[in-house]
Amino acid sequence: MNDNDSMAVKTESLSNNELLAEQWRTIDWQTVELVVNRLQIRIAKAVKQDNWNKIKRLQYLITHSFSAKLLAVKNVVTNKGKNTPGIDKVIWRTDSDKMKAALSLTDRRYKSKPLRRVYIEKKNKKSKRPLSIPCMYDRAMQALYTLALQPIAETLADKHSYGFRKYRSCQDACEHIFTIFSRKYSPQWVLEGDIKGCFDNINHQWLIDNIPMDKSVLKQFLKSGFVYKGELFYTTSGTPQGGIISPILANMALDGLQKKLAETFDISRTGRISERAHKRNKVNFVRYADDFIVSAATKEIAEEVKIVIRDFLNIRGLQLSEEKTLVTNINDGFDLLGWTFRKFKDKLIIKPSRKSVKALITSLNDVILRQGKALSQDVLICKLNQKLTGWGNYHKSVCSKTTFQKIDTIVFTLLWKWACHRHTRKGRKWIKVKYWHTVNHRNWVFSTENRELRSLSYIPITRHPKLNLSANPYFDQPYFLKRKVIKSLPEIGLPEIV
């Protein structure tokens, strides 16, 4: 091949890439999402009708739909891990790369590559959590099959399961726990459950036998193995943390626990589930991912619940963590999802847990006194506002006013240390005039001409709107849209928590 032929090939390749990039940029994403959503609704309806032959046909349609493939690639290239490569070190950065990926997605002779294993510190910093990172192509395949599996998972899920589900949140779980324990006749005992290494220990054979999706593709997701320090390790159990489809697989493995408890503790003498038996035993179940609580009328019933759950998990290759699984009285309180739930004189109080507050203070101390030494006031305010706003919005639906005020005091103390460290030869009055100003009749506001530090004390404490547990995200989209509007305007029609 001479130089002219080589130049012609490069020009043709360049024009093809430009054409693919232009196709990606002109995609009508609203139409794409509408096509995929219609297929998902049909799958959810077929699940309701218990028509599994129809479900298989619809799943085949969605996994071979070009619209679903486009959406799967988009989900991969827009999430937080879009710049994190797998073992092949490939990242889809350009529009032409994304379009090529969508065109190449297929289950024909599909074989997933091993995962890249990294270890990240847990919150307690005493141990590390294994994180497995798939290649971009494998992530897109997982996202594609997630689109087909999610309607089934949502329709069959336990009503009181809140983790990794559409339109559900930690606040919804908190609201339901409040409903369980807030009354005078509410249960007095609670089983705090924690599953040991949930993602790492789920039985592969159970998943293959019970997850309704293409078995050959599922086996590739589960048994791809991982590479750590250049050595290949085979996976014989678990679903990798870091995979897009892993949360749904874990949820589906744990679904059915609520029904099992009802069949065990809500049975009347006639052998039927009855409200009277439920009121007698007061067994209520709430789960968020692999953390859950179960209420009980007595300590003995709570211990029986523990045995039932242990047997349920054993079939799936899982075990309860003996250290973290406790039976406690509601008057002593328990922690879940960053909140402490405790009764004081028959009144349930929910507030940010000590661990959550301590973690925030440690993070703020790191930003202000370590990272912030060389930062300008503007940049420091920006970093602090991100942390304080996120933390405050998470906890604003519980009794957080006093906690917010204490944290504001701590932030002021840290900022004063930061300012004094920067100006060791200046007096207090000079430091105050330089960094703290009066804004909208508020004194001592840490601010510049462009930014001001957000005070947690000024975040309004508002009740989280209660979720309709029978609503399905594929059948009741107007309800969830309306609820989203209400959540964005919490002051309308919602009582304030003092």
Image (cartoon, helix red, strand yellow):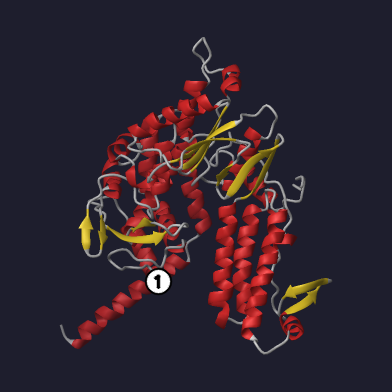
How far across and down, in percent of the image, does residue 436 sit?
A: 74, 78
Element carrying mark 1: loop
Q: Nearer the viewer, residue 156 or 160?
A: 160
In this view, the residue farthest toward the top is 270
Asked if residue 298 lies left or right of residue 317, the reply is: right
Asked if residue 163 lies left or right of residue 438, the reply is: left
Q: Is residue 316 above or below residue 102?
A: above
Crowdedness of circle 1 by 10 Å Cα count: few (<14), some, many (20+)? few
Residue drawn where x is 34% and y is 47% of the image: 200
In this view, the residue farthest toward the left is 1
Residue drawn where x is 70% and y is 46% of the image: 463
Q: Is residue 374 above or below residue 52?
A: below
| Residue 336 position by quadrant | top right
Q: Nearer the viewer, residue 429 or 135?
A: 429
Asked if residue 56 lies left or right of residue 165, the reply is: left
How far across and down, in percent of the image, does residue 375 sit?
A: 58, 81
Badge 1 amino acid: Thr
Q: Is residue 299 above or below residue 5?
A: above
In this view, the residue farthest toward the bottom is 425
How far across and down, in percent of the image, does residue 56 sit?
A: 36, 37
Quadrant into which the N terminus falls: bottom left
How far across and down, in percent of the image, does residue 250 sit?
A: 40, 43
Q: Is residue 477 visible?
A: no
Q: Is residue 493 visible?
A: yes
Residue drawn where x is 41% and y is 39% of the image: 322
Q: How many numbered discs sit on the rendered protein?
A: 1
**Residue beneath label 1, please?**
94
| Residue 5 position by quadrant | bottom left
Residue drawn where x is 62% and y is 54% of the image: 394
